[in-house]
Image (spheres, helix red, strand yellow):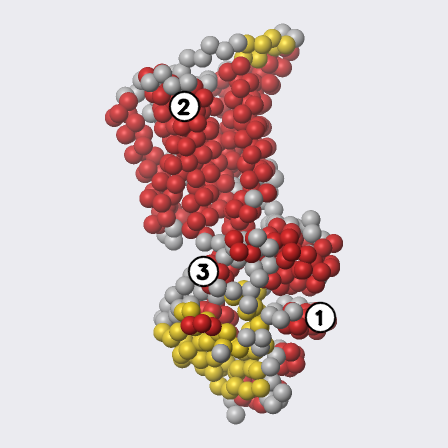
Amino acid sequence: MSLLEVRGVTAGYGAFTALWDVSLSVAAGEAVAVVGPNGAGKTTLLRVLSGLLPVRSGELVLEGGVRLTGRSAHEIVAHGIAHVPEGRRLFPALTVTDNLKMGAFLPAARRHFAESLDRVYGLFPVLADRRGQRAGSLSGGEQQMLAVGRALMSRPKLILFDEPSMGLAPVMVLRLFDLIRQVRQEGYTILVVEQNVRQVLKIVDRAYLLEVGRIKMEGRAAELSEEDFVRKAYVGL
Amino acid sequence: MIDPIFLAEAAINGVMLGGILAILALGLNLIFGVIDIVWIVYVDLVMLCMYAIYFLSQVHGWPIWAAGLVSLGLGALLGVAVHVLVISPILTSPPINQLLATGGLLFFVQSFATFLWTTDHRSVRFSLPSFEVGGIFLPATRLIPFGISILAMLGLYLFLTRTYMGTAIRAVSQDRDAMSLMGANPRRVYVVTSAVGGLMAGLAGALLIFQYSVHPFFGGQFGPLTFMICVLGGLGNMVGAFVASFVMSEIISIAGVIWSTEMGYVIAFVVFIVMMFVRPGGILARRE
């Protein structure tokens, strides 16, 4: 049984259609990547999944048959899907602790705030050292940790990562993928959208190739070489 | 030369007026900071609350504290009503339309008040003592509102920094979409913000009635001053609004003693215009 199933989703902005009949699934405990070149519709896909963009046709179904289609963003979080958005989207003028507190905004998450906070600080000790600092004053790597930590605070089942390596220095990119692997080992299910094909294939079980709004390829990460994806995605053979 | 004792008294009166102005400015600024709309009608809501206090205490014989509490509730209710009935349907319209809508509401409220209650000035009579400290008179009609305004600002500060909803209000003002990804319904946050902003208007009404009479055009007396303070402090900047309130009230109060009240306002507005050239982002330019 999949934790999340996307069935034939079409979506877009105004007259522009960014996703055409996209179907994919994520099983509980799995790590799945959606890769593809710039403008393939990866971010649009995640915006649809987190309810920031409405679906035109198709269905989003959660385990147990819960339909997420047409729900708004704040309702989808309540169903156990957390989103680490592109560009992190922290609250720059709030402290590290207050950012994490907002991650636990939902009543169900609020009840476990202290426990979740200890867990996030245990996972990312550097955040504990900076707890009183404003998020805007953190380094890029620390901000990425905070964005991940904030998503964990809602006690999600599934975490969506949107281009997590974007804007990070090459050294930080390696650290970031370690960090995602670490989150994975904590037992979370992960769906990551990424341009860095080589790195992301090392940390996921399965991957989909998204190209000009359509799924072009799918397979187990171990069987898919980076070359397959790169050739398909960038050369089109 | 003016007796220094008068200047000292003016400075103290300035501080006390500043407390009330700060309540007005913080309420308006909170709404702007979160929803990005300037409620032109803000001080007219204060006027409605003052009428409520006047009628309850002077006509129906309620104790003043009870009438004041009603004013708080009425303010919050009016805040929610303005948001739900006027702002919410045009939330995605261009800012100028939103500004015009709240401006139109101002004329509606003023005309309606004139129609119902005529243009008579009405005031609540207080028989409260005055204290004299070293030749300076401190009337309780100023001390009490000042004390309450400080407590209210402390309460607002604690609400915005210590509670989930208060922190969410600040978070929404920084990134609305990100806050909906945290599970907060931005619409609900907007309604709560409007209620808190309205509550501040109700409180301001309860504090102003100690010293001012109410009439349908009361908004004209404090409205422009409130906007000026918000802009001077940097729109959306709460600390800036707090500081600007006291800067403006001191100028008005001290210049009022040296020259005249009218001159006090002239100087305050000149300072404002000059400051807009020197520091267009506000006294404390808004931190990102």
Is residue B265 visible in the rendered image? The answer is yes
Nearer the camera: disc 1 or disc 2: 2
- The residue to which callout 3 is attached is A75
- The residue to which callout 1 is attached is A175
Q: Which mark is residue B49?
A: none
Answer with left or right where residue A39 lies relative to residue A15.
right
Q: Residue at x 29, y 34 (%)?
A: B108
Q: Is residue A17 above or below residue B13?
A: below
As shown in the figure, which amino acid type bears the numbered disc 2? Ala
As shown in the figure, which amino acid type bears the numbered disc 1? Arg
**SS for callout 3:** helix
Neighbours of disc 3 within 10 Å: few (<14), some (14-19), many (20+): many
Q: Residue at x 60, y 81 (%)?
A: A205
Q: Could you tell which of marks 3 and 1 lies nearer the N-terminus?
A: 3
As shown in the figure, which amino acid type bears the numbered disc 3? Glu
**SS for callout 1:** helix
Marks 1/2: CA distance? 61 Å
